[in-house]
Amino acid sequence: MWSKLEISMFRRIIDTEELNKLKEAVAKVSRIVITCHKKADGDAIGSSLALCLLLRNIGKNATVIIPDQLPGSLTFITEGIDYVTFSRNEVMASNIIRNTQLIMSLDYNNFDRVDRMKPWLVDAKVPKVLIDHHLNPSDCFDVKISHPELSSTSELIYRIVDEAGWMDYMDNRVASCLFVGIMTDTGNLSWSSSYPEVYYVMGKLMEFGIDKPYLYKMAMDTVPMNSLLLHSYALLNKTRVIDGKYALIVLDKDDLEKYDYKTGDTERLVNKPLSVKDIYWSTFMREDPDCIKVSMRSEGDLAVDVLCANYFNGGGHMHAAAGEFHGSLADAIAIYEKIVEEIKNKD
Ligand code: 5GP
Ligand code: MN
């Protein structure tokens, strides 16, 4: 159990006015829609399902709507919890949005991140709440709880629950979803988590009796065989290292087809080159049907969210960012090479 001293160490960070607005907005309504960004990751789905379950425990009629299909590697979190996938049930999902009384946007900072769900959310004439940890939150929300300094949206949800006085509604399932969200967004507390309070939150979540070894195994150390082979193939045959410091991995549509690529199969591939001493910038390009998906990771002073925003219509965090390029793979690589020259000049 935690002592009074430990509890007092946990800083209250949520703006009181925004927190009160959130509590009032929730108190007033019954039907609530919770959304997260497209190509949901563990934090997006974990924080959304956690908030949904908590609101249901409060007695609300809450529904999670995700923009597109969840990667198979994350379906374990959803076991026994219903949610709606917009791209698969557009009519049903848009009806739920049309009839909702409150929209909550988790783990994304503007409606460009929700794909074809965007017009439905933009046009909805109900209060909209942002709960997120990305930089540059859009101004279109009625309640804005944005904390880019935090590890994850899941940690932020825990803090909101604590500060809103909703802790009685937490349970093992809510805690498990939040634990997975923090674990996946920090590489199991490897990055974006160098402050004591994130460990405090993990400790508090463990008090709900979560099965940590199971959640770790499922979230961090389970992949389908084709994904393992695709990672190996990519590192062996499709990785270029420049000056021993920058790595570029490119998978074209033939590579993806050959290894039976499905959403989520290249998750964490971009991180791999950073294991090599001296490589501090890693880029991964994947030729998707609708765009070239570009993901970047860095260590040290290089801000890849700025690179992704400037060159690939994206954003994210300083050391983990991504974007989409609408053009050919060759053009995307040409842009990358231009950035390399810029960075070499600064090095
Ligand atoms: P990943 O490389 O794992 O797909 O994404 C890394 C980070 O960049 C995540 O924080 C994610 O939310 C953000 N991100 C991913 N794709 C996009 C995108 O298309 N646009 C923006 N603005 N951010 C993205
Ligand atoms: Mn996140």
Image (cartoon, rainbow, N blue to C red):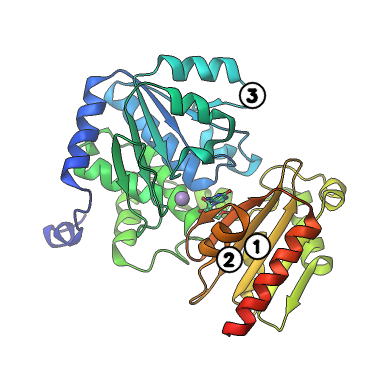
Amino acid, disc 2: Arg
Q: Residue at x 23, y 36 (%)?
A: 166
Give the mark, 1 or 3, whose residue is nearer the N terminus. Answer: 3
Q: Quadrant of residue 343?
A: bottom right
Q: Which mark is residue 270?
A: 1
Where residue 33 appears, x then y in whole percent? Answer: 41, 25
Q: Is residue 164 visible?
A: no
Contact flag, marks 1 and 2 (Cβ < 8 Å): yes
Compared across the picture, whether 163 is left or right of 158 comes to left
* Alpha-carbon span between mark 1 and mark 2: 7 Å
Residue beneath label 2, please?
297
Q: Nearer the viewer, residue 200 or 287?
A: 287
Residue beneath label 3, please?
88
Q: Nearer the viewer, residue 74 or 255?
A: 255
Where residue 126 appears, x then y in whole percent? Answer: 34, 22
Contact flag, marks 2 and 3 (Cβ < 8 Å): no
Q: Nearer the viewer, residue 75 or 242?
A: 242
